[in-house]
Amino acid sequence: MKTPLDRSELNIDRLDTDDLHIVNISRRAFLKDLALTGFVLAVGFPSLIEAEETAPHTDEAKYGADAMPHGWVDNPLVFVAIADDGTVTIVCHRSEMGQGIRTSLPMVVADELEADWNRVRIEQAPGDEKRYGNQDTDGSRSMRHFFLPMRRVGAAARAMLEAAAAAQWQVPIKEVRAEQHQVRHAATGRTLGYGQLAQAAARLPVPSRESLRLKKPAEFRYVSKGQVGIYDGQEMVIGRSVYGIDVRLKDMLYAVVARPPAFGGKVLHYDAKDALKVPGVVRVVELKGSPPPAEYNPLGGIAVIARNTWAAIQGCKALKIEWDKGPNGSYDSAAYKAELEAAARKPGKVMRNDGNIDAAMEGAARRIEAEYYIPHLAQAPMEPPAATARIVDGQCEIWTCTQAPQVARDRVAKWLKLPAEKVTVHVTLLGGAFGRKSKPDYVIEAALLSQAMNGQPVKLTWMREDDLHHAYFHTVSLERLEAGLDDQGKPVAWLHRTVAPSISSIFAHGSKHEMTAELGMGVINVPFAIPNVRIENPEAEAHTRIGWFRSVSNIPHAFAVQSFVAELAATTERDPKDFLLDLIGPPRRIDPRTLEDTWNHGESPQLYPVDTGRLRRVTETAAREAGWGRSLPRGRGLGIAAHYSFVTYVAAVVEVAVGEDGKLSIPRIDVAVDCGPQVNPERIRSQIEGACIMGVSLATLGEISFKDGAVMQDNFDTYQLTRMDDAPREIRVHMLPATDFDTPLGGVGEPGVPPIAPALCNAIFAATGQRIRQLPIGDQLLKD
C-alpha cells in the first residue's frame, strides 16, 4: 500500500499547491485522485461539510472530549471517502509519533465500516479543529476520546452503503448487511461492492446517532485482536516515511537559529560579517523574542539562512553575538536545589487536609521522614523540532512534526497577522515528541523566516544542542514526606510537601504553585487508607521554560510516594508488596473530588472514580507474575511500585543485579496494566515496553542542569539515554482484560512511566541495602 507520505514525492519540482496532497489532503488533488467519482465523504460537498456535527452544547459540566477545544466530530463526511474501485480512504486527525494512533483510529473506523483493511488508505488531516474536532495529541487521550466517535463514523458510513444497496435492489434495508467490503442481500445472495455503491451512498443523508447499529464486541474484526500492523511500518523500515525534518520543496532555503543562552535573554549586539562569508549563506535575520512568560512563542535570536543546512550551521557558528542574559542569567541547579529543600522544610499552601495531621503526628509511636529529588529532564525526541514554511499570495503553508496543529496554526496566524483560514499546517510523521512538539515556537520561527525571505520556502532545523538547551523542560522537583506510625507500625498520618516550578509559569507572571492538574498527578489523589492526610505545596519560582514531558508530574510524585512506601515497609520490617496493599486498602470506588482532585485527568468523576480494587489487582498481578518472594542470589533484588495516572492503573516489579563494583543491570521487568478495554493490544504492549525503557533511562541517567542560566548538557554524550546494553533484558507486559467495551477507556502512552523509577530504586535497596532518594542514580552505586 502506498503511503501518502512518500519521500520521493516530497522532493517536488513545482510550487503548485495541488501537488502537495502527498502530505495532507488537498481538496482538488484528492478529488482528482478519486476521478471525481465515488463516495466522497471527506471533500467536495461544501454544504455537507458545513453541516458537520460536533458535541451538543450543554450548560452542565463537561468532561473528556466534550471539554476539549472544539470537542469531537463524528461525521463520516469528514473522515471517510470511497473511490469507484473500492479503495477506502480514512482520515486520521491525530498526530503519529510512534504510538500507532495513525493506525489505531482508522482501524476502529474500518472495523465498524466492515472495510477490508488491505483496501484501506490513510490520509493525515491538516490542522483544522472546526472540521475534525480536537487535534492536541497529548494527555494519553486520543483513543479514549475518539473511540466512540470513530465507531460512529464507521457505522454511519456502513449504514449509508446498506441503504444504497437496499434502494438499488428495492428490498427492505433489514434484508441487507455489509460484510467485508461489500453489501449482501440475505435472501438472494446478491452482492454489491463498496465502490459500486459509492456514488449512490454519497447522495443519502447521514443517519442520526440514535439510529446507528454499533457492533457488539464479538463482531469486531480488528478491534481488540492485536493483528493489525502499523500502517506506515514498511515505509518506516525502508526509510521512505517523511518526518518534519525530511520535507523538501523547490527553491527551499535552510535555517538555523542562535538563541539566548538563558531564558528571557536577548541580543545586545551581533556581527554577521563572518557568517555571511560562509559559502551558501544567503542572509542573516534577527528574530524577535518574547519576554517571560513566553507561552509558545519564539525565544528570539539570530537566524542564518542558507542554501543547505550545513552552510547554515557553519554560518551560525561564525556569528559574533553579545547576549543580555536577562532575569534568569544566574540560574544554578545546585543553588536552586538548596532553595527547594529549604521550602520543603517549612509549611506550604495546604491543598488537602483530612483529619488532624498535627494531633496524629504528635501521638504517633514513630515518625519517619524522607526527601526525594528529581532534576529537570529534556524530552530529547530522536527527531529534533523542524518546520518548513512558505507564503504565496497571502497564504502560509507549513509542513511540520507537531502534536498540536491547530495551536500551531493559530500562533502562526497571530505572528504573521493573517486570518487563521489563510494558514495551513500539514502534519508529517513525528520522530518522537514526548510533549515537546505540542509547543509550536519552532513552527512560528519557520514562518517568520519565510516571511523575511518574501515567502520563499524555508526549512528551520533545530540542532540537538538547540533541542537540549531550549526545550520546555520537565520540572525539577523536591518531594518531602513524613509519616506517623502507630505502635503496630500502621501509618496513621501522612504529610507530603511537593515543591516544583509549574508549567503555568509559561502562561502567567508570578506563578509559584503547581496547578491543580499537576497536583492531581499522584499527590492530592493518593488513595491510601490513612485517616490523617495533609498535602502542601510550597512556592517555587521558575527560571526556565517548563513544559509537558511524558507522564508529566506523575514521575516525581510516584517516585517519592512509592519509594517512601517501601521505606516505611523496611522500617516496620514488613514485606513491601504486602505493606503497599495494606495502604491501598480494600476495594473502593472513590470520587476524586473527595480527595480534593477536581481535575481527574479531565474525566468525569462518575465514569472515572479512583478504583482501589483495580490498583490492588495490578499490584497483585505484577507481583505474582514476577515471582515475588522467590529466592535470589546475593546482589539481586526485587522492587515494586504502583501508580494511577491518565485514568489507568499500572504496577511494576523490577529485578536488578548489582555487581561487587556497583555496576547495575536489569534482568527483568514485569508490568501489569489495567487500561480498560484494549482497542489495539499490540500497540498497548509496545507503548508499555517503551515506557519501561524510558523510565529506566530517566531514573539512571536523565539530568538537565543549569549554570549561569544556561544548560550544561549539549548532546547525547552529556545527556545520555539508556542504550541497548543497559536496557532491561526482558520486559513482560501483563494486560488485565476488561469485562466489556462499556467500561470507559484509559490512557496508554504515559501511565507506564511513573512506577518504573521507584520500583527500580526499591529493587536496588533490596539488593544492596542502599536507598536512592535522588535521581538520576548515575554513579551512586559505583564503588571506589
Image: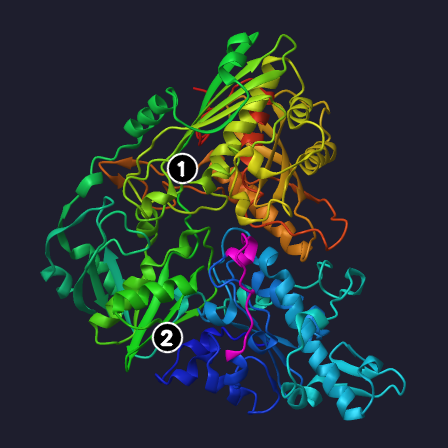
Q: Position of residue 86 (x, y in %)?
A: 67, 84
What SS does tag 2 mark? helix
Give me the C-alpha separation between circle 2 and circle 1.
Answer: 36 Å
Identity of the amino acid at label 2?
Glu
What SS does tag 1 mark? loop
Residue at horizontal 52%, vertical 84%? 47
Residue at horizontal 45%, vertical 43%? 721
Indicate which disc residue 514 carries. Answer: 1
Q: Which residue is mark 2?
A: 421
Indicate which disc residue 423 carries. Answer: none
Mark 1 burial class by Cα count in 10 Å: few <14, some 14-19, many 20+: many
- In magenta, the rendered stretch is 50-67
Identity of the amino acid at label 1?
Glu
Q: Position of residue 761 (x, y in %)?
A: 54, 27
Q: Can residue 230 be seen in the rendering of this structure?
A: no
Q: Position of residue 66 (x, y in %)?
A: 54, 58
